[in-house]
Image (spheres, rainbow, N blue to C red):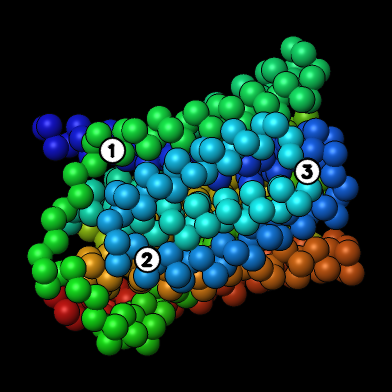
Amino acid sequence: MKQRKNTIAMVCTLACANTALYGLPYMKNQFYNILLEVLNLTHTQLSTLFSIYDSICMAAYLLGGLLTDMFSVKKIMISALVLSGALHLYVVSVPGYPGLCIVFGLLAVTSVLMFYPASMKTLTYLGGKSKKGEVFGTYIAIIDILGMVIVGAGLLILMLTKENGLVYKTILILYGLLHFIAAFMIYKLFHEPEKTKEEDQIKWSEVMKIFTNRKVWGVIIIIFCNYLMMAAMTYIIPYLSDVCKIGEQEILIISILRINILAIVASYFAGKLADKIGSAIKLMEITFLMSAVLIIGLLARPYMAVSNLLIVVLVLVITFVITSAKSVNLVTISEIGIPQKYMGTAIGVVSFVGYSPDAFFYSVAGISIDTYQINGYQIIFAIFLICAIAGLIASRILVKSKGNQE
């Protein structure tokens, strides 16, 4: 019982740490205009800051995995939190543009190079053999809840005071303090498993095998497809507005259901279900199949009478399904026989390619809509369908290979 309580506390702590570390870079999602005004930047300058962050993040996925396998994950995570916390509090003073460029570059180092692979490896360890789904699902759900609370606090302050500067400083101070609280909790709670002399030695020949491992590439395809499908659903709100002609008030309600409520429920549900059926890969297979069937409903809309109510229901169900898959997709790495001491490297390799849609998909989608208008959405949904089928095939192959081993 004590061990379980410690596990739950550590999962909550890591979720707090994740929320804090990605605080400033992710403020663009809800507070873009506030950042623009308070930091006194042009759209080009602010976009450049995010480009600096994203570019360093891509390289950091690979290097961070190796770093995690070579050094203490506890020390790495605490160092990342202390440095990032100091950076968040520094930005409260509204530094100039050159200083912000350095800050965003360093935030990519702390959040992705240092913390991300170390935290994922820690979550894999905390989940043990039978609770990985629950651990990852709970972790994602808590991140969504914390994000909603902090954003809600910012919006409340904005409504009460109309002071953009106060909203900016309050949120950054909250993120900054959360860093140090999480660092202290990791220091107190996390007992890093001791390594034997043999486990402490990294064999580079074994590391290189990860890059050519067929099962690792199967997991990469699964995560790449799931992540691209999540990105494709970003355009569902303009689709509902432009194509279905649904009003702003109704769209706001749908957005809250999709981004907040469904995400929290789906994450926890998926974690429990993955543990119950004994395989996150099997759950991914089921979600890809369901997603392929459901997206056909959106693709069919121009050719048959489909009510807006049915479209909204399809959108919400699709969101639930692919969000469920996203919350446990990294659990699949632990099911393909990668030794724990090389788990950080495997997570880095998988994340580098699996999350690469961030680098190109939004440009493709934007060009499709600008060029083909309503038909542009059909192209996005067709890409979604292709990914669902590819993910389904990759999942089926991995499920069969796992069954043959057993």
Which element is circle 3 on? loop
Q: Amino acid at mark 3?
A: Gly
Mark nearer the N terminus (3 vs 2): 2
The three-letter code of the residue at mark 1 reads Tyr
Q: Residue sitting at 40 percent across and 72 percent down?
A: 219
1 or 3: tag closer to the N-terminus: 3
How dense is the environment of label 3, judged by Cα within 10 Å: few (below 14), some, or many (20 and up)?
Answer: few
Is 390 displayed left or right of 172 in the figure? left
- Dot 1 lies on which element? helix
Q: Nearer the viewer, residue 89 or 218?
A: 89
Q: Is residue 331 above or below residue 91?
A: below
Residue occupied by mark 1: 187
- In this view of the protein, which residue sits in the foreground, 385 or 326? 326
In the image, taking residue 94 as reference, residue 267 lies left or right, namely left
Could you say where residue 295 lies in the image, as x and y percent from the top left?
A: 61, 61
Q: Is residue 384 visible?
A: no
Task: Give whichever of 10, 258 is nearer the camera.
Answer: 10
Q: Is residue 201 left or right of residue 90?
A: left
Residue at image x 49%, y 28%? 177
User: Which amino acid type is shown beneath numbered disc 2?
Assistant: Leu
Q: Nearer the viewer, mark 3 or mark 2?
A: 3
Check disc 2 and report its element: helix, strand or loop: helix
> Which residue is tagged 3?
96
